[in-house]
Amino acid sequence: MVCSGNWSLASTFIVVGFEAVRETELFLFCLFLLIYIITIGAHLLIIGLVAIDRCLHKPMYVFLTNFSVAEIVYATATMPKMLDGLLTQNKEISYSACLVQFYFFFAFGATENCLLAVMAYDRYIAICRPLRYSTMMTGRTSISLALGAWVGGLLAAFPPAVWIATLKFCFPNFIDHFFCDYAPLLKLSCEDTSAGEFVFMVMSWSVILGCFILIMVSYALIIFAVLSIPSTAGQKKAFGTCGSHLTVVSIFYGTVIFMYFRPSSFYSPTYDRVISIVYSVIIPMLNPFIYSLRNKEIKSALRKMISIRFHPN
């Protein structure tokens, strides 16, 4: 949106969220609060299991722990404010708080993207270079790769956040979403944003497609290596070591591709809110269960912890 004449600039925003009757808002509050609690609890459980079980002190689980931390802060970037709006009907958010939310949501999302690529590389070495795995993927290397994913994600979101911070925003100051997302913010801008949008698109897809290509190349090499294994049991075991990660990758990128590669006729605030709920609320809750249900070592560590807790002797 471009304002003409005298500008009336907004210093706060009203996050519309879910426009519904009070009973529906309270139901959504209870539902999303439950999802948020499950999300935080499940990821903290994975982090705790990896921390206390020495059998999980491996590069693969170093990455999984970092991914769980990223999921926790990713969900926390948006859900507390959304829950507050549903419970208290206080939809207002300050300009600075909106920018902070925008930055952290995209920063942690980019970090997850980078971590998925790092995890795919780890599985590639484990399956395609098994004899060299211990020397190539040392503890120091895994920590460096995880740190690189965090730095890459935090830096990738910085330029668009700085650009958004330079924009002026007009009244009406209603964000037609449940958090300070990119497209709804641009609709409130009093300036021509076309050049900035192009730069943001190039940067976003450089990160997203760059990581996606690395993941696809890694799994193409993994599939080629697995198919060369003569025994069916060996193939099944090899695929089993990366099945949970591939499931998470499929859900993550499937949602992103559906979000950004739809025909323009399918774009609408309602569609965007629904899809955003999927990738910002539902998927962070599902991911720890995908890993725990498909990973034998995680399940073994969980059984061991339960056994010690209830049968200490």
Image (cartoon, rainbow, N blue to C red):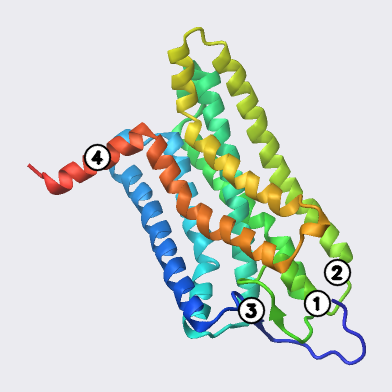
Secondary structure under tag 1 reads: loop
Q: Name the residue under label 4.
A: 303
* Quadrant of the image containing the C terminus: top left
Label 2: which residue? 193
| Residue type at the position of mark 3 | Val
The kind of residue tagged 1 is: Ser
Q: Which of 77 and 66 is in front in this view?
A: 77
Labels 4 and 1: the sequence-earlier one? 1
Q: Earlier in the sequence, mark 4 or mark 2?
A: 2
Q: Nearer the viewer, mark 4 or mark 2?
A: 4
Query: Which residue is identified by label 1?
Result: 189
Find numbered disc 2 in the image and state the secondary structure of the residue it sits on. loop
Q: Are marks 3 and 1 in contact (CB under 8 Å)?
A: no
> Which one is closest to the eye, mark 2 or mark 3?
3
Q: What element carries label 3?
A: loop
- Label 3 packing within 10 angstroms: few (<14), some (14-19), many (20+): some
Residue drawn at x 43%, y 62% as measured from the top left: 35
**Residue type for callout 4:** Arg
State the residue position of label 3.
Answer: 16
Picture quadrant where residue 62 is located: top left
Q: Distance between the residues labelled 4 and 1?
A: 53 Å
Q: Which residue lies furthest to the right in this view?
A: 5
The alpha-carbon separation of the residues under discs 2 and 3 comes to 23 Å
In three-dimensional space, the C-alpha distance between marks 2 and 1, rounded to whole angstroms, equals 8 Å
Q: Distance between the residues labelled 4 and 2?
A: 54 Å
- Please give the name of the residue rendered at 42% of the width and 71% of the height, measured from the top-left corner: 30
Say whether residue 130 is visible. yes
- Where residue 248 sits in the image (x, y, percent)? 53, 42
The picture places residue 227, in percent across and down from the top left corner, at 57, 14
Few, some or many residues within 10 Å of mark 2 (<14, 14–19, 20+): some
User: Alpha carbon of mark 3 to alpha carbon of mark 4: how far?
Assistant: 44 Å
